[in-house]
Amino acid sequence: MSDLINASLKELGAALAAKKVSAVELATLFLDRIDALNPGLNAFIALDRDRTLAQARAADESLKVGAGATALTGIPLAHKDIFCTKGWRTSCGSRMLENFISPYDAHVVEKLAAAGMVTLGKLNMDEFAMGSSNETSYFGPVKNPWDSSRVPGGSSGGSAAAIAARLAPAATGTDTGGSIRQPAALCGLTGLKPTYGAVSRYGMIAFASSLDQAGPMAKSAEDCALLLTAMAGFDTRDSTSLERPAEDYSRDLEKPLNGMRIGLPKEFFGEGMDADVRAAVEAALAEYRKLGATTVEVSLPNSGLSVPAYYVIAPAEASSNLSRFDGVRYGYRAPEYGDLNDMYSKSRAQGFGAEVKRRILIGTYVLSHGYYDAYYLKAQKIRRLIAADFQEAFKVCDVIMGPTSPSVAFAFGAKSADPVQMYLSDIYTISTNLAGLPGMSVPCGFGATHLANPMPVGLQIIGSWFGEAKMLQAAHQYQKATDWHTRMPGGLS
Amino acid sequence: MNWEVVIGLETHAQLQTKSKIFSGSSIAFGAEPNVQANAVDIALPGVLPVLNREAVVCAIKFGLAVGATIAPRSVFARKNYFYPDLPKGYQISQFEIPVVQGGGLSIRVGAGDTATEKFVHLTRAHLEEDAGKSLHEDFHGKSGIDLNRAGTPLLEIVTEPDMRSSAEAVAYARALHALVQWIGICDGNMQEGSFRCDANVSVRRPGEPLGTRREIKNLNSFRFMQQAIDFEVQWQINEITEGRAIRQATVLFDPDTGETRSMRSKEDAHDYRYFPDPDLLPLEIGADWIAEVESGLPELPQAMQARFQAEYGLSAYDAAILTASRAMADYYVAAVAVAGGANGKAVANWIMGELAARLNKGDMDVAASPISAAQLAGLIQRIADNTISNNIAKKVFEALWNGEGKSADEIIEKQGLKQITDTGAIEALVDEVLAANQKSVEEFRAGKEKAFNALVGQAMKATKGKANPQQVTDLLRKKLGA
């Protein structure tokens, strides 16, 4: 059985096709692990064994008949609770939606179900995806499987912890400022945020519409490529979804790296990065040179402005996106209130957590009359400058690399009292969201090696617009030469 | 001293699309509450707006009809505020860059020969979605929300402060009301709220800068618009005269009292926190799209007026009346098509005379006229070819109105109304009349012209009006040696 929990999606698909295991057996295996281990991790916040097994039986049926079966049919995965999932409670990690059963499927959920994948459950997350540690979830924090005193990262912390603990072979995540890549790095996984517009946002509860993008989280680049191929594609229901021909994101995986030019932004290698992270990243770059790639220094002069620009734009959009949660039609409504305004105030005061309220207040402020030009418009200008920096850099390189996060997973409470410190943990990931670029994180070693539980370090790979295939090629070739991505936290099997 | 009234109008025209502006729900009026509200309309988590191209086509049509600039790139923005019938907590509208920019409308103020022309400049017209409705009755102390209307496409049309009286404002509103129906973008139904106006009103001494304005909201009839503006103007003049400054405010007109009253002042106005909607790309309209829409646009009222004057010799006033609505113009064009261009003037006279009078009496629109354009044209043809006289024609008209026959010809035939043109028959009749009215003959010979008219009257009476009056007159004069 340990073979199956560590198997790649390709191996699981082969086992299912060869009838070595059924979809029901596979789903049961993971559901049983969830029952045993989730209470300590808190990664899953919605489970429905009957629904999961019904889906698995349907997958077995389709595998038996052969018709309509894909390479992913019968393979289980879990969804971040930001994706509307028909018949499932979809809470977005918030009390506001604690009792919201979605009447429809998100585009991503629909596509993965259409590919035959089996939903294991819904995964914990920072409330409305606002957080970098999973400490803002209404349903309590998720523990990092490598060290339960540490955070798994966020906001897709439930997704990361579930895969790291082998409670699911893969999961969906979303990334607005690093919410796929940072938890992937902190939990020793591979996670990919696609180019903005590659994956439809329909049915994905909006945090910051111009930055949000859904992507896969799994153990390897090979798995992510398979999942992304199933998730991506044009959707008429999302006006920002791009009408491009369907892509096979696995197509370049086996190409060698000879001649690949890796850009190293000098701004990503300055101060602020912990020594253990730096060491692991440098070692990874040395490995890349061994594999035939060359490295070149590039500059992203405006990247220092990315965190402040992000914390104007994202809260501005969020303040408006979250206005629909008013207690009128669905969601939390205060049990007692006076007039209409009192109903709004009390419902939203009680339904939202502190970090969400902080961002709504910031967003409302920066959009206010008299402040709009100074904050929102200026931030949008910075955004264009940041995108132009990347455009310039990609003239001399094929991919950009650096650390995903400045440190390994930190302890619970270490940054939760200081929002600025927390925001800075996304300093290397935010600029790609602002520029709309694809980015991923791959495990490249361990930090905190002097401690009982060394913690994973992530290498960030940033591709040019629609450069996912190249990014995945770089990640896969590295993973063929190293085994960091196969490491599993101790004490869980 | 004189006061100058300054008025600008903002009009919300509901666009005649099949579905909502950002979702696939129907926009038909009168459905049960909330049955025409889908996941997007009720703003479930995760849903996204998708722009309805038909709404854009309506905006392009309007822009072309008013000679405006169609913006090659316009932007949808979010107008943020909380209200229970606004499901997303923001309305998607256009703010900094609207789709229609500039342009204007030529209006006629007053009636007949005293009417004057005026050009009202438009500032802009932009696309936006309507909100739902709050129902405050019949819910046992609670409010009901109906989201059927939420997401209905609107074109908000904004004028410059060009109007100087309530009459001008109403003339503009009527012209706009006719135009949006003319180009088929709005059904113009004011009772159902498809066309509603807000009036910004201020007063000043001539030559002085603009006074502080107050906005009268939701005027849904032309009569109320006139009353509301007149009341508001007088109120503002009184306030200023008595030394009180006007404060910017939004006011409502109460048709029962005929008064306007303040709803909210500028101080408690919302800060809508407009910003570009990140869920929608900028709206890009290329020259080819504009050309495609233009090719499907009907002939516009102004062009039609000029054509009617040139081709049928109508006066400017007649041409304006006949193009006051699409239905009227359609009727006229259809009638002329049957009657022939040479009868264009006669057709105009009949429509504006007999037909208009009958329609007014029955409070009917020309589209509902029991006499079709072809029937009226058939009648006019019989006058032109001397089959019937004008007087008989009025009888035939009456018969057509009452449905006594399918055509003028049928009625003329059935009721024996054909004009007598047989000279012999008329001559015999004239002789009889002369013999029977010796007194009149003598009076006429003594120089009383009136007596001649009496003789003509007697002759016409004898033929039941069917004789050609000209022929009778000529014969009488001949016989009397006059």
Image (cartoon, helix red, strand yellow):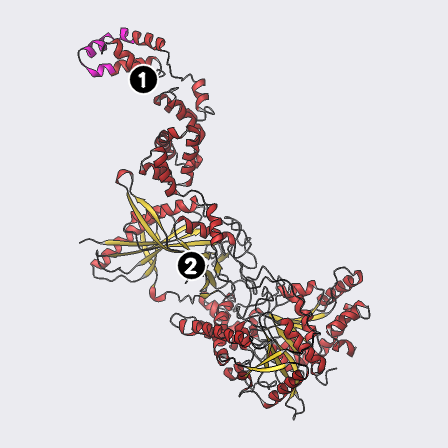
In 3D space, how far apart are the residues under numbered discs 2 and 1 (Cα atoms)? 64 Å
Q: Say which quadrant the N terminus of chain B sits in.
A: bottom left
Residue B442 magenta: yes
At label 2, which amino acid type do we have? Answer: Pro
Q: Disc 2 sits on a residue from what chain? A: B
The answer to whether residue A87 of the structure is visible from this angle is no
At label 1, which amino acid type do we have? Answer: Pro
Label 1: element kind: helix
**Magenta residues, start to end:** B433-452
Mark 2 in CB contact with mark 1 (< 8 angstroms): no
Label 2: element kind: loop
Q: Residue furthest top?
A: B435
Q: Position of residue A277 (x, y in %)?
A: 61, 87
Query: Which numbered disc covers residue B469?
Result: 1
Q: Position of residue B352 (x, y in %)?
A: 35, 33
Q: Determine whether, in the image, residue A292 is placed left or right of residue A402.
A: right
Residue B345 magenta: no
Q: Is residue A210 above or below residue B178?
A: below
Secondary structure predominantly adopted by residues drawn in magenta: helix
Q: Position of residue A408 (x, y in %)?
A: 61, 86
Query: Which numbered disc covers residue B98?
Result: 2
Q: Residue at (36%, 39%) from the top-left corner?
A: B305
Q: Residue at (37%, 14%) from the top-left corner?
A: B421
Q: Nearer the viewer, residue B477 or B233?
A: B477
Q: Position of residue B26 (x, y in %)?
A: 54, 51
Mark 1 Cα within 10 Å, few/some/many (few <14, many 20+)?
some
Location of residue A30 by image quarter = bottom right
Q: Nearer the viewer, residue B3 or B291?
A: B291
Location of residue B434 by image quarter = top left
